[in-house]
Amino acid sequence: MMFRTEIDIPKADFEIQPAEQMLFVGSCFADNLGRRFVENRFRATVNPFGVMYNPASILHTVEKCTGVHPRVAVFTLGTNHVYILKETGEIVDNCQKRPQRLFEEKELSEEECAGYLQKAIDLLKAEKVIITVSPIRYAKYGYHGSLLSKATLLLAADRLVKANPGVVSYFPAYEIMNDELRDYRFYKEDMLHPSNQAVEYIWEKFRETYFGKAAELFLEDWRPIREALGHKPFNPDSEEHQKFIARTEERKRLFEKKYGLVKG
């Protein structure tokens, strides 16, 4: 008997490489996923100008990322709602706690969402772009309104995949959370955000989809070094611990040399 709906995710037609240069832009879920790559020594840049919830703001980040040249980019779409500063008519990325009366709220259409993201794709010139829709619901829109927002983003993502064959792929984080993990034990206390366990599960699914043997070996090489670096000793000043630190630093140096991570 099956007690959950498993999402069938086909293996991607490309592989993320060891120490891959990547850019993550989007909602706070981009932070959650991107942090896994940073912690595991991928050369990942994560939301360099802060969290960006909508497609227009994702484009704004890409426009400012003049010194970032990733081979793989990940866009995580949170909402199609944007806030326009009445004084200038411009979409703002952050209201900066200014009075609500200064802004007009607007819902982007599927075409507008796809248009902003296509501009970002064209400008970034990454070889591969992965698009995913954040599984985090927006209670302030009402749950029906939140579903409409996600549906618009899903349609825009599908349009981009079809318009950019071989470049854009879709990863179903939204579907995994709402189908495979549709139980409140996989949510944080607010019952809106995925728990750490849920994020870890989605990370594992992401690995299965986009990692090959080389990237998995890279993770295995780094894991014991990472664990050693995080070790908290009972006596940090002891001679034995100082030797342990020296051995760990040497292993780290050799790892960085092996994978071309040495700075300078």
Image (cartoon, grey):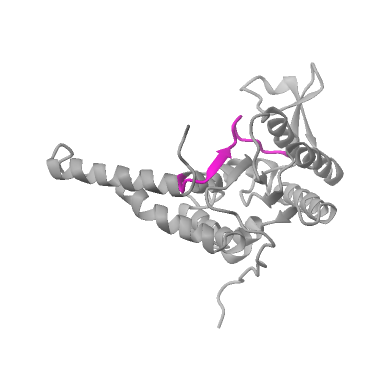
Span colored in magenta: 39-54
In the figure, is residue 87 to the left or right of 78?
Answer: right
Of 83 and 164, nearer the camera is 164
In the figure, is residue 216 to the left or right of 234?
Answer: right
In the figure, is residue 56 to the left or right of 213?
Answer: right
Taking the image as drawn, is residue 184 in sight? no
Q: Residue at x 83, y 53 (%)?
A: 159
Image location of residue 133, percent across then percent down: 68, 50
Q: Residue at x 82, y 22 (%)?
A: 89
Q: Residue at x 71, y 56 (%)?
A: 170
Q: Residue at x 64, y 41 (%)?
A: 70
Of 50 and 211, nearer the camera is 211
Q: Is residue 41 magenta?
A: yes
Which corner quadrant holds the N terminus? bottom right
Taking the image as drawn, is residue 214 in sight? yes
- Location of residue 254 with respect to 87 vertically, above or below: below
Give the number of marks: 0
Image location of residue 38, percent across then percent down: 49, 43
Image location of residue 100, percent across then percent down: 69, 23
